[in-house]
Image (cartoon, grey):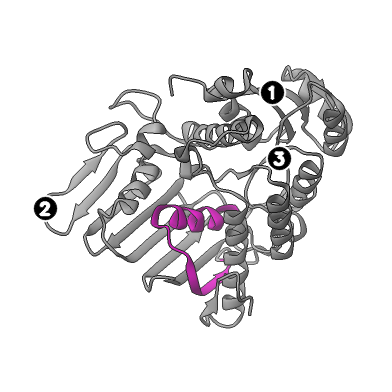
């Protein structure tokens, strides 16, 4: 990424405002860092907390030029300024994603939003409709789609190197909630443990949507039906910490899906295996610079960032020479940078580079929420096969 296409198109960086992600939020610092890595954005405004005083103080401490007490105040004020924000990044609790995204779109801002897009399918569908009507850019930060070798995997599938996809396995296994004392008894309940704020299923909203999105991104397939079991394995826990499912895809392929946050000792094991008629690819987030390809006929090939056989979609996502590691921060930055190019092209009345249009959007968000909805219905029905398509919500 040696050039800055945003400056080439607009003559300046995009002006970014952030809502949420204040003190104590690791995802907030991740968003802000991702926006700066490729110099596509200038951070001009922030409302970082639901507490007005804390919000203004946090923004000032971070050196953000304009500090606001809440998100709506920020949106109203920035919309009136000649030098106001172009883009709004939202990293608030899940139950306010719809509120702030809709308010931003109504005021003419392009939007970058943390996942999941919303807590409910109704809100997700409403937001998708508003995005389509507005013509504005909406980016959902499923950051694993930005990893160079995840993009290499997608490009290899598109290139036909795997043949027809027949089998998919995906797992996202964490151990951060394995303790029976999580949350700590007597403490204020974290918002993620509140079904109203965090969503109807903790594990599905937190990491299940990531696993689902990764499958769709790499394979290009849609889940047509799901047979799921969702619940908790930590005794007396009131929220979901486990989900397992069988999947049927729209091309007839079969899949296995497993996510949990209660596997003691495991850190962040997101992994995917895709098998087609011509071979299998395997990738693991904890070893992000290795993509294994096992052809049906021929020796195993190991792909690395910018190594031999790197396809354009993956090459675009790498910043450093072969043999050097890239990972979580850079993947997040790739999503931000691709969104920036799409936003700049829209504002300049130009066509965006097709390679910049692979970031997750509002439709991806809707399909993620739809998958959660279908899996929960299946689980409630004893694991019955349940349609996961948008055309059916039975």
Q: Are marks 3 and 1 in contact (CB under 8 Å)?
A: no
Q: How many marks?
A: 3
Q: Which residue is mark 3?
A: 90
Q: Does 90 appear above or below 281? A: above
Where are the magenta residues, as a range? 206-232
Q: Residue at x 50, y 55 (%)?
A: 213
Secondary-structure class at tag 1: strand
Q: Position of residue 387 (x, y in %)?
A: 55, 76
Q: Where does the N terminus fall, quadrant-wise?
A: top left
Q: Which residue is mark 1?
A: 43
Residue 205 position by quadrant: bottom right
User: In the rendered view, does 170 fall on the left or right side of 102?
Assistant: left
Q: Where does the C terminus fall, quadrant-wise?
A: bottom right
Is residue 88 visible in this depiction of the protein?
yes
Q: Which residue is mark 2?
A: 298
Q: Does 225 appear above or below 236? A: below
Q: Earlier in the sequence, mark 3 or mark 2?
A: 3
């Amino acid at each position: 990424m040696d050039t800055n296409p945003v400056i080439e198109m607009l003559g300046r960086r995009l002006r970014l405002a952030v809502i949420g992600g204040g003190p104590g939020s690791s995802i907030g610092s991740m968003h802000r860092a991702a926006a700066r890595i490729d110099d596509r954005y200038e951070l001009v405004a922030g409302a970082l907390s639901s507490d007005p005083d804390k919000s203004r103080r946090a923004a000032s401490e971070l050196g953000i030029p304009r500090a606001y007490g809440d998100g709506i105040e920020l949106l109203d004020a920035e919309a009136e300024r000649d030098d106001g924000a172009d883009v709004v990044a939202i990293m608030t609790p899940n139950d306010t994603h719809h509120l702030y995204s809709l308010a931003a779109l109504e005021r003419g801002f392009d939007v970058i939003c943390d996942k999941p897009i919303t807590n409910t399918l109704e809100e997700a569908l409403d937001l998708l409709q508003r995005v389509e009507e507005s013509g504005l850019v909406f980016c959902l930060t499923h950051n694993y789609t930005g990893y160079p070798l995840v993009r290499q995997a997608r490009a290899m599938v598109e290139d036909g190197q795997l043949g027809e996809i027949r089998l998919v396995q995906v797992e996202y296994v964490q151990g951060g909630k394995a303790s029976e004392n999580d949350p700590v008894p007597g403490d204020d309940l974290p918002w993620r443990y509140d079904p109203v704020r965090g969503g109807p299923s903790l594990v599905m909203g937190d990491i299940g949507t990531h696993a689902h999105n990764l499958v769709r991104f790499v394979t290009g397939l849609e889940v047509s039906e799901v047979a799921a079991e969702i619940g908790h394995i930590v005794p007396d826990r009131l929220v979901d910490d486990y989900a397992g499912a069988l999947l049927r895809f729209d091309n007839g392929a079969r899949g296995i899906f497993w996510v949990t946050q209660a596997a003691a000792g495991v850190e962040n094991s997101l992994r995917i295996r895709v098998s087609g008629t011509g071979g299998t690819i395997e990738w693991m987030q904890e070893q992000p610079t290795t993509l294994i390809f096992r052809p049906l006929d021929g020796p195993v090939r190991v792909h690395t960032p910018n190594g031999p056989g790197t396809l354009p979609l993956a090459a675009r996502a790498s910043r450093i020479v072969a043999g050097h590691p890239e990972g979580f921060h850079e993947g997040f930055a790739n999503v931000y940078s691709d969104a920036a190019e799409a936003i700049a092209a829209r504002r300049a009345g130009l066509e965006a580079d097709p390679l910049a249009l692979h970031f997750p959007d509002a439709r991806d968000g809707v399909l993620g929420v739809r998958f959660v909805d279908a899996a929960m219905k299946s689980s409630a029905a004893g694991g019955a096969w349940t349609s996961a398509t948008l055309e059916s919500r039975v």
